[in-house]
Structures are given as C-alpha cells and as structure tokens.
Image (cartoon, rainbow, N blue to C red):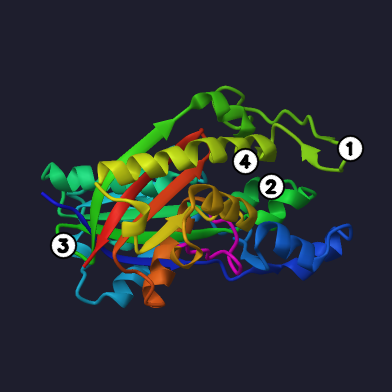
Amino acid sequence: MKAYIKSISYSLPEKVVTNEELVAKFPEWTVEKIADKVGVRQRHVAGEEETATDLAVKAAEKLFAENPGLTKESIDFVLFCTQSPDYLLPTSACLIQQRLGLRTDIGAFDFNLGCSGYVYGLSVAKGLIAGGIAKNVLLLTGETYNKHLHPRDKGNRTIFGDAATATVVSTEGFAEIGEFALGTDGRGAENLIIKSGGARCPEKVVDLSFDENGNPHSSDYLFMNGSEIFMFTQKNVPVVVGQTLAKNNLTLEDLGLVIFHQANSYMLNFLRKKIKIPQEKFFINMENIGNTVSNSIPIALYDAKKQGLLHGPVLVCGFGVGYSWGGCILRLY
C-alpha cells in the first residue's frame, strides 16, 4: 500500500532572539557577520517552562484547525521525534495522546534522532501504512536545543532555533512518499553530543572550560565540533543524494525542488555547488527561524507549499547528530 503526506503544520515559540540581541552580549560579533556566516537573522526560543511536547501539541492543534476534514478520531498512530523529551520516562508521545484527546486504541512512541529525524520518521510512518498497521499516522517533531546551550556559547546560539511540526502520513495525500536511502555511523557520536544526563553519565560533570576563542566546552551542555560535522556532510550528503535518486530512478534534472536539513547557509550552499544542484531548485528557509533540527525539513515543506514552489519530484535530505543521514523522494500530486 502506498503512503502519502496528507497535511503539515508547525508551531514556533513566541520568544524571538534577534542578531542585535546576540551582538549586545557578544560584541566581537556583528549583525551582518552572523547573517552572512549562518544565514540567520532571528530565531525562536522556547520559554523557561515551555517544552518540546508543548510545542508539538500546539503544532498538532494547528494542523487540525487548518485541515477541518481531518479529525482527531482518524489518527491511529503517533510518532514523536525529539531529543528534548519531557521526562526520561514515560515517552512523550503518550503524554501527547492524552493532551490531544486522541483515541486510546492507538500506538504511540518517541524516537531519538536529530537532523535526520523527519526523513526517518517518514520511513517508519510509511512502514506502518504499508504493513496495514495504521491508516493515519501523526508524525511529530519537536526540539528545544536552546535549553542545551551554554549561555556563552556564541557559535551555537546564533544557529539553533526551537520549534515543533506535525505531519499526517496517510493512505492518500498531496505527496507520495517514495524510496529511501538511509545511513548511520556512530564513530561520529562525540562530535555532536551532550555527555551528562543519561545512564552513562547521570550526574552533571561540572567541567566547564573555555578555548582560546572563548568558546565553552562542557559535558553538561551541547558540544558541536563544527569542522568535523562539515567534513561529515561534504563526504556523505552527495553520496546519499545519489543513492536516493538511483533508488527512485531519477536524475537531478528530473527534480522540481531539493530541500536539505537547514543546517546553516554556508554549508547548504557548499553542498549545493558540490552536488551541482541548480540554485532555482534549492530551497533555503532559515533566515527567521534558524536551524530547528528535526523540524527544519517539514517547516521548509510547509512554507514551500504555501509559496507555490512544490512541484515535480521533491528530494528531501536530513543529516547530522549520530552520525545519521537519510534521503527520500516525495512525488507531488
């Protein structure tokens, strides 16, 4: 049985942090330097008491409001991609089921992935549809990475924004989900990591130090080795794009649009040129929201659709923490 994206929506926190506000805290930066380096002018940041689950519930409620023909009673599975769960247990998807008032005779679980998470979520949802296990899967993504950043982490604070999205994958819709190419390499785990807080290191380590550029390093906050992440993407993203095209019997020329995980504008443009994707077919959508991790691809899909830019086969590709990467084709109807 074929699987389709039926509808998408998203929610953003009310709080906005502009480049001007960051420059006031980090005077060695300039507003234009941040915009030129990462392609972001502002980002939304979750409130102190606002969680990824809260944002995901808002995204789902917005999706149902925007699609009156879609009922909560029709949902028979909930998938929630997050690395910012409310609790170690229970799974946040169970909390979401209750808060949305969904039926109790449905499946629900979280899965922990970052920037590749939406593509992986589509693959799981497609499997549930194809296996006859579900007819309408509510695929949610939600991240509040800013809660994991040290206040003096000027690099990552310019990049990341918080958000949540809601997608219904169904037996019918506007985009058929094609074949996938997926990849994993755990050797890169320590290049994007929060070391404390899990079973391996449950207590805070309190080992904060600063490098020669004043960047904080701590086991208790998110650490990203930017140069290693860049090397990973330039090696693996062109390969997974080629694999995705081959599995779907397509070429770059056949594509109507390409949507990558919105990491930062420099990396995206480097990859676009390396893979030789025409600029007019390449969608960048992060200036006002930043890198929203697993949310970036569905937000881009929603906005591209609203702008009338979704046409022909669309290639989506996510890559990052894990290392983990994946691509698939969406065929528009």
Q: Is residue 108 visible?
A: no
Find the magenta span and give its range. Answer: 282-292
Rendering coords of residue 153 (x, y %): 76, 48
Task: Report which residue position mark 3 lands on.
Answer: 172
In three-dimensional space, the C-alpha distance between marks 4 and 1, rounded to whole angstroms, equals: 21 Å
Amino acid at dot 2: Leu
Question: In which quarter of the view is residue 37 placed?
Answer: bottom right
Query: In the rendered structure, does residue 288 fall within the stretch colored magenta?
Result: yes
Of mark 4 and mark 1, the one earlier in the sequence is: 1
Q: Up-down: is 134 above or below 279? A: above
Q: Is 204 in front, or is 38? A: 38
Question: In which quarter of the view is residue 195 placed?
Answer: top right
Q: Residues within 10 Å of mark 2 (few under 14, many from 20)?
A: many
Amino acid at dot 3: Glu
Of mark 4 and mark 3, the one earlier in the sequence is: 3
In three-dimensional space, the C-alpha distance between marks 2 and 3, rounded to whole angstroms, equals: 40 Å
